[in-house]
Amino acid sequence: MASMIKISDILKENRVKIGLKKNAKEEIIKEIIDLFADDDRINNLDEVKKVVLERETVMSTGVGKGFAIPHGKTNAANEIIIGFGSTAEPVEFESLDGNPVNLIFLVVGKENMVGEHIKILSRISRMMNKDDFRARLSKAKTPKDVLNIISYEEKEYLG
């Protein structure tokens, strides 16, 4: 079996923001992308923003149950990056279930890494569909808490 791509291997503490300041969908997405301003895996931050926001106009990435996974593929990224943010107050995200969002995973991959990109999106979706996992993430106080919660869930889920 191919090695499993783990979210906990890609997501780093400095790419997690608890208590996002913005309260509009586009601004929140930009705020998470800005966590990568100093990341050498990104060669054009504006291009990443453009691609993710364009993807958002096609269909909202507010999946439902209070979470969203804005994402996109662009060669402005050298490899797959993942960011995470949470908001104190839920934000209107044009979600599929009509509910506002307070947990946001950002996934950006290279254009030729479609398989990995889809695997990561589906892994995040599966974990986020668990009520207790979302509840724990919502209560996380620090980026380290977020990473520990994700690591624990991946251990449980991946065995």
Image (cartoon, rainbow, N blue to C red):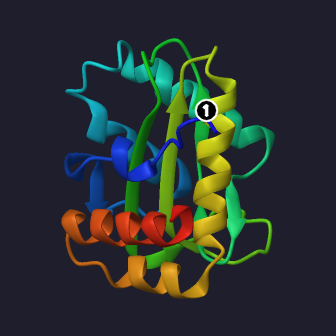
Residue 31 located left or right of residue 47 = left
Q: Which of 75 and 126 is in front in this view?
A: 126
Q: Which of 10 and 71 is in front in this view?
A: 10
Residue 57 located left or right of residue 73 = right
Residue occupying image coordinates x 49% and y 72% = 156
Residue 71, x across and y down, in percent: 59, 40
Amino acid of disc 1: Glu
Residue occupying image coordinates x 79% and y 66% = 96
* Residue designated by label 1: 116
Residue occupying image coordinates x 50% and y 79% = 133
Q: Nearer the viewer, residue 73 or 59?
A: 73
Report whether residue 4 is seen.
yes
Residue 43 located left or right of residue 103 = left
Q: Is residue 121 above or below residue 99?
A: above
Report whether residue 92 is seen.
no
Residue 48, x across and y down, in percent: 48, 25
Residue 66, x across and y down, in percent: 60, 75
Q: Report which quarter residue 98 is drawn in.
A: bottom right
Label 1 sits on a secondary structure element that is helix
Q: Is residue 158 above or below residue 60?
A: below
Q: Is residue 127 above or below residue 117?
A: below
Q: Residues within 10 Å of mark 1 (few under 14, many from 20)?
A: some
